[in-house]
């Protein structure tokens, strides 16, 4: 910004982004951190580059003697390209992050991965998708709160209880705060209004609302329970509409 005031958006963006998500959703999921990271990296590397340039100039000042000037010039030449310092800095940073990697993760592919590369929930939804496909017929609709993996694996019409792709879901929120166990809960009237052929949810999403509703219990039958304790849930549940 000292050299080019037009660079202010690069400085402002990460902090504005953080403020917006902190105010709008206090539960800051880790994937929200990805978009501003390039800006952080750019600012840090620009700072390292500037320090390297300043250091090169400092080493060139010397005390005015030819001998020292020659020595300083050689030192200056060794540091004449800030990119060298930036590369060394990047190597040091990457080396310091190696402790956050696992050689053999406890789930997913058996290959080195960062500890935060956690895909256990997606693997459960992939198993749930296979179960749904064993029962589904052409034209059946699937309802879920976390829709990405299910939609990808089944290619079925998806009804989204959050309202991302199913706008009619939004009219059912805000809902009764008493049905929340974690940060999300599915009201029974939403699912009954959508009337899907299949419902896939983590048990904790419906513990005090959907699963205790008598109308839902009469209309849907549990066809599979996948064991998991993610988010404090007692399994992942796969329901089919009971036509009998």
Image (cartoon, rainbow, N blue to C red):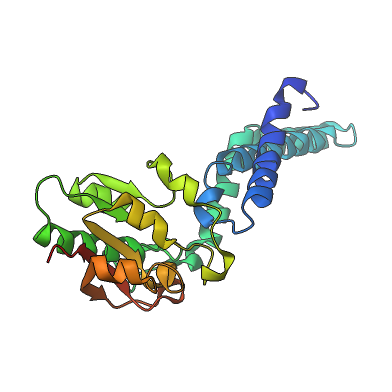
Residue sitting nearer the eye, 172 or 128: 172
Quadrant location, the N terminus: top right
Q: Residue at x 87, y 33 (%)?
A: 65
Q: Position of residue 181 (x, y in %)?
A: 52, 72
Q: Is residue 215 above or below residue 164?
A: below
Q: Residue furthest right?
A: 63
Q: Is residue 44 left or right of residue 218?
A: right
Side of 37 relative to 136 (left or right): right
The quarter in which the C terminus is drawn is bottom left
Please state if 239 lies on the left or on the right of 11 as rendered. left
Q: Position of residue 14 (x, y in %)?
A: 66, 41
In this rendered view, identify the residue nearer to me: 12 or 161: 161
Which quarter of the figure has residue 71? Answer: top right
Say which residue appears at 41% left-offset and 75% top-offset: 233
Looking at the picture, tell me which residue is in the foreground, 171 or 234. 171
> Residue drawn at (48%, 51%), measured in percent from left and top?
172
Q: In the rendering, at what x and y percent does residue 169 appear?
A: 42, 47
Q: Could one spot residue 152 in this view of the protein?
A: yes
Q: Is residue 142 above or below residue 166?
A: below
Report the residue at 63% width, 47% height from top. 21
- Taking the image as shown, residue 206 lies to the left or right of residue 239, namely right
Q: Residue 45, image x and y in percent? A: 63, 40
Visible residue check, residue 48: no
Question: So how many labels did they put on this image?
Answer: 0
């Amino acid at each position: 910004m000292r050299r080019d005031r037009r660079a202010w958006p690069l400085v402002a963006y990460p902090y504005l982004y953080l403020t917006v998500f902190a105010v709008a959703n206090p539960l800051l999921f880790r994937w929200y951190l990805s978009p501003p990271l390039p800006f952080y990296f750019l600012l840090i590397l620009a700072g390292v580059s500037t320090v390297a340039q300043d250091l090169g100039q400092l080493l060139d000042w010397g005390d005015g003697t030819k001998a020292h000037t020659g020595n300083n010039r050689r030192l200056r030449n060794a540091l004449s390209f800030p990119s060298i310092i930036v590369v060394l800095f990047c190597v040091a940073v990457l080396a310091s992050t190696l402790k956050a990697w696992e050689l053999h993760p406890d789930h997913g592919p058996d290959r080195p991965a960062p500890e935060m590369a956690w895909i256990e929930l997606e693997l459960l939804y992939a198993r749930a998708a296979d179960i749904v496909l064993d029962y589904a017929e052409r034209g059946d609709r699937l309802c879920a709160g976390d829709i990405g993996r299910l939609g990808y694996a089944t290619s079925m019409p998806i009804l989204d209880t959050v309202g991302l792709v199913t706008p009619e879901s939004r009219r059912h929120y805000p809902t009764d705060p008493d049905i929340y166990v974690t940060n999300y809960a599915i009201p029974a009237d939403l699912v009954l209004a959508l009337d899907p052929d299949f419902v896939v949810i983590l048990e904790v999403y419906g513990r005090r609302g959907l699963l205790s509703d008598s109308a839902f219990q009469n209309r849907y039958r549990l066809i599979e329970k996948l064991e998991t304790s993610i988010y404090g849930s007692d399994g992942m549940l796969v329901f089919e509409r009971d036509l009998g």
